[in-house]
Amino acid sequence: MKREVKFKAWYEGKMYEVFSYNLIANTVEIPLLRFPFIQEVIPDNIIEYTGLKDEDGKEMYEGDIYDIYESKDATDDYFCNIFKNMSDDKRKYANFINELITLYSGFNASFKREELDFDLTKLTFLLLDKKDIAINDIQDFCVRSKTDLSTAIVPQNGYLFEQPICILLSYYFFKHRNFLRNEWPLSLESLQDLYRAFNTSFDSF
C-alpha cells in the first residue's frame, strides 16, 4: 500500500498546508487569510508526510524526526518506523546525527543524547548541503586526529565543543579550512573559538 503524498511548507516563519508543489520551480501554493487566499511562493522549507501517525492520531512529517530524538518516551520500534519512511536526505542527516553523537561520546563520555542542541546542529548541517562529507571520512578523521580532538573537546573551549557537531566542524577545519571560513553558518565568536581550540591564529576576514 502506497502512502499518501502530501507536504507542509514553512513560509515567513509559519507552517502552511500545501495545495500544490511545483518540483521544477520549487514553489508551492499555500492558503492565506488575505486575497488572493491561495498564493504561489518559494518556501523557506518543505517537509513531506511520512505516512505515519503518532499515538494521538496526529500525522507525522519528516521534520518531526527532531521531536522524536528529543522525546524520552519514543520507542526504538516507533523511531524505526518513522526512519523507514523518511526521504533519503532526511535519513542521511539522521544517520549523521547518530554517528556524530557516537563519535563525540568517545571524547566526552558524560554527554547525553537529550543534551543535543538541534538548532545548532541544523544550522551547521547547511555546510553539508554545500560540501558533502562521507561519514566514513569523519570516522577516519577521528582516529587520525584523536590527540588533537581530545585536547580541543573541553568546556573551556566554548559551547561549540560541548556539542557533537564540533566533530564535523573540526573535520572541515582541518580538511577544508577556506571553505569553512567562507561558508561559516554560526557567529564569528564561535569560529574564533574553533581556531583557538586548535592553537591556530585567527586573522581577520
Image: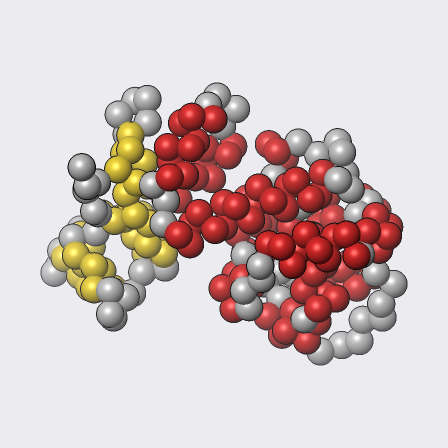
Residue at left offset 67%, top offset 64%: 172
Can residue 28 be seen here? yes
Can residue 119 be seen here? no
The reply, left or right, for residue 63 in relation to residue 179 is: left
User: Count of labels shown?
Assistant: 0
Residue at left offset 80%, top offset 56%: 145
Question: Which quadrant of the figure has residue 65?
Answer: top left
Q: Nearer the viewer, residue 159 or 67?
A: 67
Quadrant of image for the N terminus: top left
Residue at left offset 28%, top offset 66%: 26
The reply, left or right, for residue 90 in relation to residue 155 is: left
Q: Nearer the viewer, residue 189 or 64?
A: 64
Question: In the image, residue 18 lies at what x, y percent?
Answer: 21, 51
The reply, left or right, for residue 103 in relation to residue 84 is: right
Question: In the image, residue 203 lies at what x, y percent?
Answer: 80, 76
Whether 44 is drawn above or below 50: the answer is below
Whether 191 is drawn above or below 2: the answer is below
Q: Nearer the viewer, residue 191 or 144?
A: 144
Whether 136 is drawn above or below 62: the answer is below
Question: Which residue appears farthest toward the bottom when viewing the image?
Answer: 205
Question: In the image, residue 69 lies at what x, y percent?
Answer: 50, 34
Question: In the image, residue 93 lies at what x, y percent?
Answer: 50, 50
Question: Which residue appears farthest toward the left when viewing the image?
Answer: 36
